[in-house]
Amino acid sequence: MVIVHTKDTMSDIYLDAVKIRHQVFVQEQGVPLNREIDKDEAYAIHFVLYEDGQPLATARLLPLADHKIKLQRMAVVKTSRGKGLGLKVIQAAETFAKEQHFTEIFLGAQLTAEAFYQKAGYLPYGKPFLDAGIQHIAMKKRL
């Protein structure tokens, strides 16, 4: 297993991330493609977990102001869920963020994934909100 990252939106790594996100968010969850691929793609750091050369999980980090960063687009292909791959991608993203001197990480978790993020150390705050037609909760973690 290997986890790599890129900011290059022309790279194979980025294209693999988009492929996973398309399967999970667009095909499975019905998120409109124009909501899935957004204006922040070129500003984000894209992570992809590969196993035996196959892209299986992804996430992206979007730098914010004041040493804060946002974890977004966390996805694991359906056939690989429940194997801890999502947590491995999150840990790699957090390690990267710490190395870059970010002090706090934020995310908007789908309500069905709230417990997953809590196990990873994230705390919910605020009220649930709708994003792309799916209920979410804001969460954060000190790095």
Image: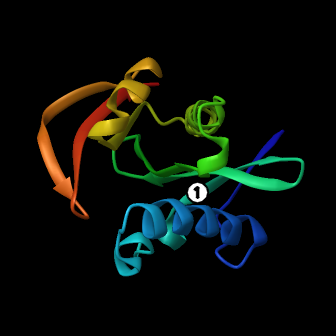
The number of numbered discs placed on residues in the rendered structure image is: 1
**x and y percentages locating residue 113 in the rendered image:** 37, 36
**x and y percentages locating residue 71 in the rendered image:** 44, 46
Q: Quadrant of the N terminus?
A: top right
Up/down of 30 relative to 106, above or below: below
Q: Residue at x 24, y 45 (%)?
A: 136
The one nearer the camera, 15 or 101, is: 15
Residue 53 appears in which quarter of the rendering? Answer: bottom right
Q: Residue at x 21, y 62 (%)?
A: 133
Q: Residues within 10 Å of mark 1 (few under 14, many from 20)?
A: many
**x and y percentages locating residue 86 in the rendered image:** 58, 37
Q: Residue at x 61, y 61 (%)?
A: 20
Q: Amino acid at mark 1?
A: Ile
Q: Residue at x 57, y 31 (%)?
A: 98
Q: Is residue 140 left or right of residue 17?
A: left
**x and y percentages locating residue 13 in the rendered image:** 74, 64
Q: Is residue 113 left or right of residue 54?
A: left
Q: Secondary structure at mark 1?
A: strand
- For mark 1, what is the residue? 45
Residue 32 appears in which quarter of the rendering? Answer: bottom left
